[in-house]
Amino acid sequence: MRKSLLIIALTLAAKFSFAQTRISIDYVNAYMGQKVEVCSKVYGVKATEKITFINLGAAFPNAPLTVVIFAKDFPNFKGSV
């Protein structure tokens, strides 16, 4: 019984220790340098063999956030080229 409770407690602790703050695209500037999860609509994606740009919150050039993914990082994303 104690062993089961310990496993459950450790599982919950691990889950919450890796949780990120979820924010709206409207507040992205307030979280510079921090790890957060940004929630917004994707308005455009431009991809080449070496780099991908993802515009969030509005279409280019008015996007409040553009995510840049370099080719060396493509394997870290599901469905990547």
Image (cartoon, rainbow, N blue to C red):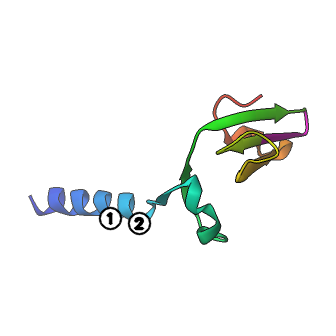
Distance of mark 1 from mark 2, alpha carbons? 6 Å
Where is residue 77, by image quadrant?
Answer: top right
Q: Residues within 10 Å of mark 2 (few under 14, many from 20)?
A: few
Residue denoted by label 1: 13
Residue at left 50%, top 57%?
23
Q: Position of residue 38 (x, y in %)?
A: 56, 52
**Helix, strand or loop at disc 1?**
helix
**Helix, strand or loop at disc 2?**
helix
In the rendered image, the quadrant that contains the N terminus is bottom left
Q: Position of residue 31 (x, y in %)?
A: 60, 69
Q: Are marks 1 and 2 in contact (CB under 8 Å)?
A: yes
Magenta part of the protein: which range? 49-53
Residue denoted by label 2: 17
Q: Position of residue 21 (x, y in %)?
A: 47, 62
Q: Seen from this angle, which residue lies furthest left?
A: 1
Seen in the image, is 30 located left or right of residue 43?
left
Residue at left 24%, top 58%?
7
Relative to 24, say whether 32 is above or below. Answer: below
Q: Position of residue 76 (x, y in %)?
A: 68, 43
In the rendered image, the quadrant that contains the C terminus is top right
**Magenta stretch: dominant SS?**
strand
As shown in the figure, which amino acid type bears the numbered disc 2? Ser
